[in-house]
Image: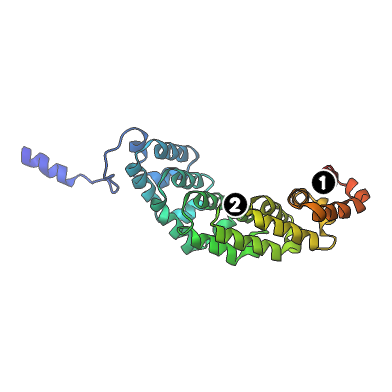
Amino acid sequence: QQQQQHQQHQQQPSNCFQLAAPVAGVSATVAGKVWELSQEATGCREVQRALEEASAEIRRQLASELRGHVWEALRSPHANFVLQKCVATLEPEALQFIINEIVHGSAERAAKSKFGCRVFQRLIERCPGAQVSQLVEAVIADFAVVARHPYGNYVVQHLLEHATPQHRHCLSQLVERDMRGLAADTFGSTVVSGALSKAPQESQLSLARALLREEGLLVFIACTKHGHNAVIRTLQVLKGAEREEARRRLLADEPALRTSRFGRSVLQHA
């Protein structure tokens, strides 16, 4: 009888995914099903809770179930939250597979993705500059497109604040060189405004001066939804004679500015 029981035990199928460390609670209910659950509204919340409550070792093992599915998760309205939770709870070195899969697929495409841009931003916040350098450099290489994109512009603004000093300086220079084109663009103007408040201090002054040099641009964007914030920030950054020159140009077109609620907002700061 013992021999028969032993044979039956050997014939039982084993779980294809086994955690190396013992688990309990919600972690035990999601183990082996992380990717499946991550694609569902309720399931993705379960996985996020498991990641929050698990030990560091169990988190790594649960996250490893997403290997090979990162790009699918980036496009998922549910699974992207699981990726973000992984970034928030795992140590940076455990996130390398996410970075690798994004780079292999197209980092700039991830930056322009509705959900992928969120994961991109969390990685920049969490990981050392050297670890995410390929992500940042992909955005820099496609800057003109990403900065004008409905979702990509948020990534560029985030990089201007959180990237390495060298990358922040490089991005600031790109904004300055394309000042007129960006300022006239709906989403590009948010990058100009973001750069004037998030770029390194010395870059902010250079950007404000560049905006002032562009004939007629200050007044034009003062009447736009996103551009008027850039003008207000320019008035805050410039000092002395340069600030007075900016005020002079704006007040010279005061009647035009008063026809726009955004222009009126600028005049309150002039």
User: For the residue labelled by badge 2, is the local secondary structure a helix, a strand or a loop?
Assistant: helix
User: For the residue labelled by badge 1, is the local secondary structure a helix, a strand or a loop?
Assistant: helix
Viewer-closest of 150 and 169: 169
Residue holding disc 1: 266
Q: Position of residue 157 (x, y in %)?
A: 63, 53
Q: Is residue 235 above or below residue 4?
A: below
- Please state the total of marks drawn on the protein image: 2
Q: Position of residue 210 (x, y in %)?
A: 75, 61
Left or right of residue 71, residue 231 in this image: right
**What kind of residue is marked 1?**
Val
Left or right of residue 160, residue 7 in this image: left
Q: Farthest residue in the front direction?
A: 240
**What kind of residue is marked 2?**
Glu
Q: Position of residue 49 (x, y in %)?
A: 43, 36
In the picture, which quadrant includes the N terminus? top left
**Tags 2 and 1 touching, CB below 8 Å:** no
The quadrant where residue 2 appears: top left
Q: Farthest residue in the right direction?
A: 255
From this viewpoint, is residue 221 visible?
no
The quadrant where residue 215 appears: bottom right
Residue holding disc 2: 161
The crowd level at tag 2 (other Cα within 10 Å; few <14, some 14-19, many 20+) is many
| Residue displayed at 46% across by 52% down | 127
Q: CA distance from mark 2 to mark 1?
A: 24 Å
The figure's colour scheme reads rainbow
| Residue displayed at 77% across by 48% down | 232
Viewer-closest of 165 and 145: 165
Q: Is residue 172 above or below residue 193?
A: below
Q: Is residue 7 above or below residue 252?
A: above
The crowd level at tag 1 (other Cα within 10 Å; few <14, some 14-19, many 20+) is many
User: Upstream in the sequence, badge 2 or badge 1?
Assistant: 2
